[in-house]
């Protein structure tokens, strides 16, 4: 039996600060009162002046993206342009509540049986199983063999954290083995893994000269990594570059990873946003599953359902293929069952159980055939507008004869484009033209619209002429 730590005695704690036992020899009650009063004031002053035990905590830098958003909001210039935040905007530069989400919301509001009871620890199961079918496909061999564990998470970030925490506790790895992240990657990846004690390093990904994929660098890194290394892969619409491997390149990546026994940890934050098709954007994940990998996926619904602040996501873990005879009749195969139990412990200790509203929206949209079909149209609207902006921007730059080759803007896909603008050019654009983007030259394509694309193109044209690379 484990021994409970003994709590400190209340009496000792209460009597510690001021002792009345060592009496002084003051003669009158008035003197004694003055003495006690003096004693108490000195004590109070001492307490007030004591330095915090956290006095040596260094100040952390502000989050660059959220600082950028704040700077944009504070700017009063009427033509200011926000190309920082990775959130969809309409052609009127407004956030978009998806029509299908409005319908699901109405269903929830009108439901007389709705209550605010806790969800189960693993979340809303009708939602998590639909989310699994969405990413793996209805005909997934992993789902058929009942070797997929799905647990609701606080959106993509929470799903990444849940997975990282699980790996930090259970992944059998040599000490100091690093988690490989693409160079560059979404800024939060590093701290999510390092916060749970998993050191990170980078694998080559982006080739600045071609503004495309550094396929040779990437495959060399895979070949040279220690067996069992974890590689975080963006399932589609790579953030920040907008550069994805082709199907053939994914096949090659999967072959090397299988050969070297590397562990794929997919981050899927943009399904449906890259091509407009949910199936096409799940191609890489499904290919790895078909190849028989043990893998995991952090899945976000922030972007594709436009539910940014509702924090809707899932963490899925896929165990290796089973012999037919070992496929369980029941819920999950043995190893998946055990993994699920450990994920539940992590969830219980961190958030106890996930929030319901966004998951209910996802549940309704994913499980209702008519609403699901409508969602696909909403996705096409968003992806289509972004694709159109890519075309318009390149056309405008061509018209202006802007120095440089801008064809990468239309080749890149998803929410972002890695323009190739330098930090100096980016800062000049912010100061002079009130155009806000991250320092690495990434622009959120959804921030462009038919009203500001020309203004942006002209500003880019000016800055690349005035500040050549
Ligand atoms: C690559 C990538 N992963 C994960 C996320 C997580 O997003 P969220 O926590 O809002 O779902 C983002 C958001 O921008 C992202 O770009």
Image (tube, rainbow, N blue to C red):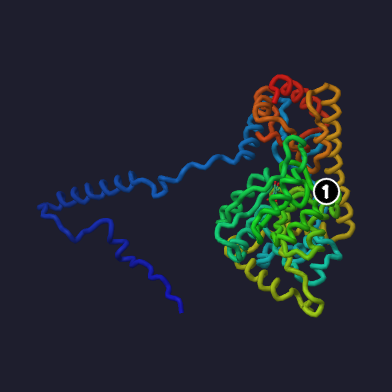
**Whole-percent x and y of residue 453?**
80, 29
Please give the name of the residue rendered at 65% of the width and 36% of the height, measured from the top-left corner. 69
Please give the name of the residue rendered at 29% of the width and 46% of the height, measured from the top-left corner. 46
- Element carrying mark 1: loop
Given residues 118 and 436, the one toward you in this image is 436
Residue under label 1: 246
Q: Is residue 430 above or below residue 277?
A: above
Counting the numbered discs, the total is: 1
**Whole-percent x and y of residue 101?**
80, 51
Q: Is residue 111 visible?
A: no
Q: Specify the farthest residue to the top.
A: 466
Q: Is residue 32 left or right of residue 362?
A: left
Q: Is residue 14 visible?
A: yes
**Whole-percent x and y of residue 260?**
71, 60
Q: Is residue 201 left or right of residue 129?
A: left
Q: Is residue 3 above or below residue 250?
A: below
């Amino acid at each position: 039996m484990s021994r409970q730590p003994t709590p400190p005695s209340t009496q000792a704690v209460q009597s510690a600060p001021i002792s009345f036992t060592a009496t002084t020899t003051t003669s009158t009650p008035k003197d004694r009162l003055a003495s006690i009063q003096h004693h108490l004031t000195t004590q109070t002053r001492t307490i007030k002046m004591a330095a915090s035990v956290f006095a040596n905590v260094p100040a952390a830098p502000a989050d660059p993206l959220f600082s950028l958003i704040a700077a944009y909001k504070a700017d009063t210039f009427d033509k200011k342009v926000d190309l920082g935040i990775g959130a969809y905007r309409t052609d009127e530069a407004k956030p978009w509540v998806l029509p299908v989400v409005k319908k699901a919301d109405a269903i929830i509001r009108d439901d007389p049986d709705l209550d605010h009871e806790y969800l189960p620890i693993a979340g809303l199961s009708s939602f998590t199983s639909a989310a699994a079918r969405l990413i793996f496909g209805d005909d997934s061999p992993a789902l058929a063999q009942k070797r997929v564990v799905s647990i609701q998470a606080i959106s993509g970030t929470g799903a990444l954290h849940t997975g990282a925490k699980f790996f930090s506790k259970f992944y059998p790895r040599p000490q100091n083995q690093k988690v490989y992240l693409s160079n560059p990657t979404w800024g939060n990846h590093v701290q999510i893994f390092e916060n749970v004690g998993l050191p990170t390093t980078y694998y080559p990904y982006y080739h600045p000269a071609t503004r495309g994929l550094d396929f040779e660098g990437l495959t060399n890194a895979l070949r040279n990594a220690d067996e069992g290394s974890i590689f975080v892969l963006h399932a589609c619409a790579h953030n920040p570059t907008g550069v994805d491997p082709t199907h053939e390149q994914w096949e090659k990546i999967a072959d090397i990873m299988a050969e070297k026994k590397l562990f794929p940890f997919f981050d899927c934050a943009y399904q449906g946003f890259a091509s407009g098709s949910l199936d096409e954007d799940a191609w890489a994940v499904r290919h790895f599953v078909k190849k028989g990998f043990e893998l995991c996926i952090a899945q976000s619904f922030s972007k594709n359902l436009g539910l940014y602040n509702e924090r809707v996501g899932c963490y899925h873990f896929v165990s290796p293929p089973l012999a037919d005879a070992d496929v369980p009749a029941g819920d999950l195969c043995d190893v998946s069952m055990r993994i699920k139990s450990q994920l539940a412990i992590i969830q219980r200790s961190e958030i106890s159980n996930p929030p319901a509203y966004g998951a209910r929206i996802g549940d309704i949209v994913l499980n209702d055939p008519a609403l699901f079909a409508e969602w696909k149209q909403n996705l096409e609207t968003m992806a289509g507008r972004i694709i159109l902006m890519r075309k318009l921007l390149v056309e405008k730059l061509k018209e202006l004869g802007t120095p440089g080759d801008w064809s990468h803007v239309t080749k890149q896909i998803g929410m972002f484009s890695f323009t190739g603008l330098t930090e100096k050019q980016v800062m000049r654009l912010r100061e002079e033209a009130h155009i806000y983007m991250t320092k690495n030259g990434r622009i959120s394509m959804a921030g462009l619209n038919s009203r500001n694309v020309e203004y942006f193109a002209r500003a880019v044209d000016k800055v690349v002429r005035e500040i050549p690379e």
